[in-house]
Amino acid sequence: MNREMPKKTISNKSNYHHGDLKSTLVNEATQILKEEGVEGLSLRKLADKIGVSRTAPYHHFKDKNQLLCTIAEQGFVRWQRDAESIFNRDDISAQQKYQLFFHGYIQYAADNPELYDLMFGRTIWKQNSATQALKDIAFPSFQHQVEMTRIWQKQGIMPSNENTLRLSQVTWGTMHGIARLLIDGIYADRTHIYEMCDCAVNLFTRQLSISDEVD
Amino acid sequence: MNREMPKKTISNKSNYHHGDLKSTLVNEATQILKEEGVEGLSLRKLADKIGVSRTAPYHHFKDKNQLLCTIAEQGFVRWQRDAESIFNRDDISAQQKYQLFFHGYIQYAADNPELYDLMFGRTIWKQNSATQALKDIAFPSFQHQVEMTRIWQKQGIMPSNENTLRLSQVTWGTMHGIARLLIDGIYADRTHIYEMCDCAVNLFTRQLSISDEVD
DNA sequence: AGCTTATATTAACACTGTCAAGATAACTCA
DNA sequence: TGAGTTATCTTGACAGTGTTAATATAAGCT
């Protein structure tokens, strides 16, 4: 018909079939997300950017929501790698470890604000629109922190008289809250990340060596 | 022309001019927000519900954003009244006061999830789209809590060695984070509000009477 | 080669926020 | 009172969105 100029360079074959649309969609979408936020990420614009028709994405993702969930999944995987590498260190004290973990979390959020917002924001979680695959990676991520909290309690750097689940919810809530403040720019800004983290860690932990006062 | 059936009952005069559109818009919008969230709140649907043309709202609000900011303002006013009435009580201890304040905050968020999301969420704050009027009420709200924190530190129920601003950011961040967890239904649910609040308050405060250990 | 399936396309629908022009009524001041 | 100004509301239009249906193309399999 009336199609003459090839728009792709990846493959020298015909370009009716893209060949790698699914992962290209995720990658380009991730970049648009980073640069313009969810508001700026439309399927049509995305398709345009890749050089494919508006409805092509629907052969790889049922929904826009499903695309977003896939991107969020990757965000969890990346953060989990970071967290794991902190937990696995054995050259530092438990308290230092928690401090690194706390600060690493906030830093990750501050470095990838739009991604973080997608991972934990209303867009996905509000109407229970999270994919099962996403749930399967997001929930264990929190569960893992509950386990760590239990250990920190046993080690005496966190109050052992508090219920572990509640304590985890509160400490994670604090990280989440601070992250949101930074991202949305409400009552805090990036120049004070370290100080805020230190303050929070001080409140939640007690050095083992100094007093050891357990009631 | 072809307009015959009067749709309004408030006034017996002609209904070309609504007469009280501005406040009606805010009220109806607030209700839609409560029932369907921001996603379900469109200016056209709102206008339809009121019985006015799609563009009528633009004579009272420059933007959809401006309408949202107005609703958020009301949310701040309402919460501030609640908070004030807690601060002004003199029949309870400072610690109990903080506990009530903390729990009241979370309860307010849990009772008005969509409103809370508007007040502190990305929609308004992300692209600096907050009205000056909204800023003028939102920022003092936090400032007020900084002052309270300073007092609580002086009274010895909060650690006095921490920087007041940082401590305020952390404690407020915790409330904000817990509120968000509840609203978005991520890692917590409403049945444990009390326990989570108690846990957080325990972490942030120390009873005066028991040990009084200040380093 | 022929059939099936995956992948891509265009057309269309029902929404959205917002602007421009025009209609109507209220308000103001002689 | 009457004329002119202003506030308010209307229809029409535009550009954008997600998504479905029907169709075209090509790759893979037997």
Image: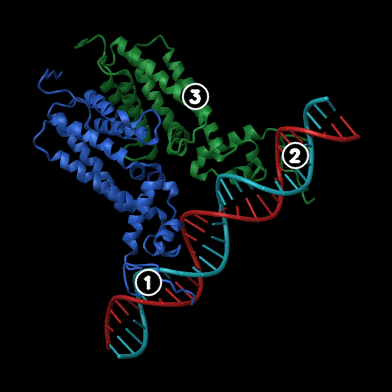
Chain colours: A green, B blue, C red, D cyan
Look at the picture and state if A60 lies above or below B43. above
Q: Amino acid at mark 2?
A: Asn
User: x, y percentage for residue B110?
Assistant: 31, 38
Q: Amino acid at mark 3?
A: Ile
Question: What residue is drawn where x is 59% and y is 34%?
Answer: A26
Q: Which of the 4 image quadrants contains residue C14? A: bottom right
Q: Is circle 2 on the same chain as circle 3?
A: yes
Question: What residue is drawn where x is 31% and y is 26%?
Answer: A170
Q: Which residue is mark 1?
A: B15
Question: What residue is drawn where x is 14% and y is 20%?
Answer: B214
| Residue in the foreground of this view, choosing between A90 and B46 | B46
Please give the chain letter of the residue carrying mark 3: A
Q: In what quadrant of the picture does the C terminus of chain B appear?
A: top left
Q: Are marks 3 and 1 in contact (CB under 8 Å)?
A: no
Q: Which of the 4 image quadrants contains residue A31? A: top right
Q: Residues within 10 Å of mark 1 (few under 14, many from 20)?
A: some
Q: Is residue B53 visible?
A: yes
The local secondary structure at tag 3 comes to helix
Q: Which of the 4 image quadrants contains residue B161? A: top left
Q: Is residue B149 visible?
A: no
Q: Residue A204 — which label?
A: none
User: x, y percentage for residue B132?
Assistant: 31, 52
Q: Which residue is mark 2?
A: A15
Q: Nearer the viewer, mark 2 or mark 3?
A: 3
Q: Which residue is mark 3?
A: A137
Q: Nearer the viewer, mark 1 or mark 2?
A: 1
The local secondary structure at tag 1 comes to loop
Please give the chain letter of the residue carrying mark 2: A
Q: Estimate the spatial distance between the alpha carbons at disc 1 and disc 2, rounded to whole Å.
A: 60 Å
Q: Residues within 10 Å of mark 2 (few under 14, many from 20)?
A: some
User: x, y percentage for residue A117?
Assistant: 44, 35
Q: Amino acid at mark 1?
A: Asn
